[in-house]
Image (tube, rainbow, N blue to C red):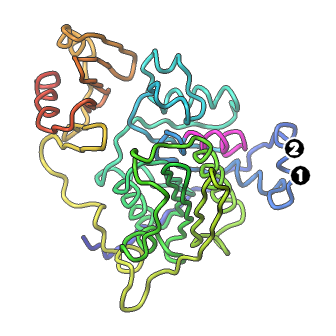
Amino acid sequence: MQRQRRSTVHHPKREEPEIDRVRYERQIRFAELGERGQQVLAKARVTIVGAGGLGSHVATTLARMGVGTLKVIDRDLVELGNLHRQACYTEEDVQQAMPKVYALRRHLLAANSSVKIEPVLAHVDPYNVLDLLRGSDIVVDGTDSLGARFLLNEAAVELSVPFVHGAIAGSSGLVLGVEPGATACLFCAFGEEETKPQPRGIGSAAGIFPPSVEVVAALQSALAVRRVVAGPEDWGGKLFAIDSWTGDLDTSEIRRRTGREACQVCVRHRYQWLGGEKPEGPRVDVDEDQINVIPEKPRPVDFDVIAARLYRANEIKRNDYLVWARLGDLQLVVFQDGRLAVKGTNDWAEAVHLYEKYLGE
């Protein structure tokens, strides 16, 4: 898809916030940040997409540093398998089947009540991503699939919003800062096989070494703060490859692809992942371990009705945000907006059947 017109982000004038010099004394004494930088941070609006390993650690760092507004977008709830690598979440969150964004907001506000946390419980897709990211000073990638990362990259380019990519596999990770229109974008670096660096090990088969999550998230946080405070000069376009097991760190310049082999995204503005006509009826999104069935339009769900329909479930949990149920080997989650998430099958037809059975009119 080709877009001829690019969007420009216009930020309203923001009042000078009052700085708690006792809380932030040590970082204000860091010359590159200083009191002026702290003022800039306090007015900044950062959007983090994904509240898992990377996103939760980035959110924790930025909230404690005093970033003014953190918008955190994620579609999932806290599970026991998250706790070994994701920040803030607790066993109580698992027991309560809490969505990550709401659990994270509670924990972050307990650490710094002056920060504004905007939780968004949503499945990010080509049809809502521009609205979700619009108005951000910078976007940080905490997603875990290549498609989601390319989608965020295209949205950031379209909106001319700086973007910090991060990825983990095994003990290795990659970080890239993207300044749309000035530096290489994610597609410049990863869009062609001959220029595609890979972390050691691919996908969930490689497992995750938790210290790598913290290392990559720390670098993402540092790049985000630097861009917010110091601006675009000499920022972005460097690919950091880190292995926390071996201690190796490689940095390479990624050249923006122009000329005859110009990048399809940041130069030609031809988008593979972004936009297009929204299909009619429910949509199906198949991930590695989860299938999401998304209604054509968000609609409020009566959780009492859903719980009654799931009376044969082996186990049911519910709160203000969702109903969770175990049906044999399957796990079903019904969210406020009518989305159904199914784990335990890779058969999208079965997921659609469950959607029609439990959320059908």
Name the residue at 37% across, 39% down: 122
Give the answer, above or below, for where 182 lies relative to 104: below
Q: Is residue 61 magenta?
A: yes
Give the answer, above or below, for where 349 lies relative to 179: above
How far, Cα to Cα, is label 1 from label 2? 6 Å
Q: Principal SS element in the magenta part?
A: helix
- Circles 1, 2 touching at the beta carbon (< 8 Å): yes
Residue behind mark 2: 25
Image position of 257 (left or right of 344):
right
Q: Secondary structure at mark 2?
A: helix
Q: Quadrant of residue 298?
A: top left
Image position of 238 (left or right of 120):
right
Q: Secondary structure at mark 1?
A: loop
Name the residue at 29% across, 44% down: 287
User: Around disc 2, counting alpha carbons within 10 Å, would you say few (fewer than 14), some (14 to 19), or many (20 or more)?
Assistant: few
Residue behind mark 1: 29
Boundaries of the magenta span? 56-67
* Quarter containing the N terminus: bottom left
Residue 86: x and y in percent read: 55, 35
Residue 64: x and y in percent read: 71, 39
Name the residue at 43% across, 39% down: 74
Residue 119: x and y in percent read: 49, 35
Q: Quadrant of residue 177?
A: bottom right
